[in-house]
Image: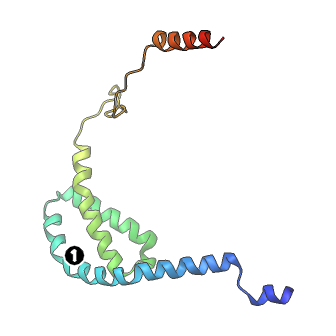
Amino acid sequence: MAHDKESGISRREFARRAAFVSAAASLAPANLLRAEEAKVETQPQQAPAAANLSSQSQAEVDSRIQSILAQYGSRLSDAQKTDLRRLATEAQPPLDRLRAFTVANGDGPALYLKPLIEREKPPAAKSSAPAAATAAKKS
């Protein structure tokens, strides 16, 4: 009986292998097609975005890229480094717009959480009176 357990596959090992095969099958074909399209599209997109940045913003983008490459550069492929440059450049204009707002210490939060639907609560006196009347009838 111990021999049967050793030669077979455990449920845990089966689940692990099934998850790996499923992930590999679902990701491999889609990534191959997208990688070819991304290589063609990334070159024209980088030039206009970089031209819109001020020198201070461009310096911030460059320092952000250098910081990431210093920490993770050996793990990244050339395509990933290209994507990193594109994403850092695209992220800079929203950061500049966000930093343009003036904020003082006394300012309250800009977002208040409100329920999407305002529901009216039934009056407590009306809801307890019928319940008391039905309880009196049952007694």
Q: Quadrant of residue 1?
A: bottom right
- Percent position (x, y) of residue 98? 26, 45
Amino acid type at image mark 1: Thr
Instruction: Give SS at disc 1.
Output: helix
Q: Residue at x 15, y 75 (%)?
A: 44
Q: Residue at x 45, y 77 (%)?
A: 75
Residue at x 25%, y 35% (from the top left corner): 102
* Whole-percent x, y for residue 20 in the image: 54, 79
Q: Percent position (x, y) of residue 113?
A: 37, 33
Residue at 13% over, 67% down: 48
* Foreground residue among 47 and 116: 116
In the figure, is residue 55 to the left or right of 30?
A: left
Rendered-image quadrant of the C terminus: top right
Q: Residues within 10 Å of mark 1 (few under 14, many from 20)?
A: some
Camera-side residue: 115 or 94? 115
Q: Which residue is mark 1?
A: 42
